[in-house]
Amino acid sequence: MKINWGTGIVLAFIGFISFILFFVVRMNMDDHANHDLVTEEYYKAELGFQKEIDAETNANNLSSKLIVQKTPEGLLVQFPEEIEPEKIKGTVSLYRPSNKHLDFDLPISLSNTHLLIPDKRLLDGRWDIKISWEYLDLPYLFKESITY
């Protein structure tokens, strides 16, 4: 049977469209390719963005900055020396971009100016750390991406 050029073009288009649809369906059905949002309620979180900007400004206006450093025991968070540690209230949130099941929050309760996050809680890779705290009814916020 002889195929003319019109039939050949139609078969080529059908083959190309089938090829593309195969990969679209495969990527949507595959559990290995996770398509989660960064936050579940993204638009509600967007409304509080100005409060975060103000809290970050407060943290940047401190005379000494908050320091996050990697140590053999874990991740050490050092608060500024001029702040009384007993009056700090807040949370440390660690977010793992590659796997939301590894995310966790820690409450801040200090007896001295540093907080240690144990090494066993942190897997190797990238972590986004967000430390939000209040001191004398003034909000503060610190954000940083670290590779552990």
Image: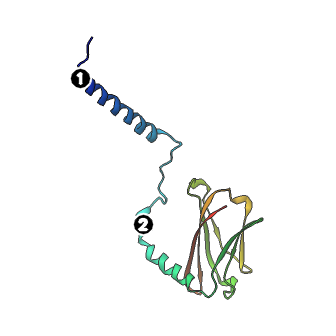
Tell me if mark 2 has few (under 14), some (14-19) or many (20+) residues whose alpha carbon lies within 10 angstroms of its own: few
The three-letter code of the residue at mark 2 reads Lys
Tell me if mark 1 has few (under 14), some (14-19) or many (20+) residues whose alpha carbon lies within 10 angstroms of its own: few
The residue singled out by tag 1 in the image is 5
Q: Is residue 118 above or below residue 6?
A: below
Secondary structure under tag 2 reads helix
Q: Is residue 12 above or below residue 102?
A: above
The residue singled out by tag 2 in the image is 44
Image-quadrant location for residue 126: bottom right
Q: Residue at x 68, y 86 (%)?
A: 84
Residue closest to the eye, 88 or 123: 123
x then y, percent, for residue 143: 57, 71
Q: Residue at x 47, y 49 (%)?
A: 35
x then y, percent, for residue 124: 67, 56
x then y, percent, for residue 138: 55, 85
Image-quadrant location for residue 77: bottom right
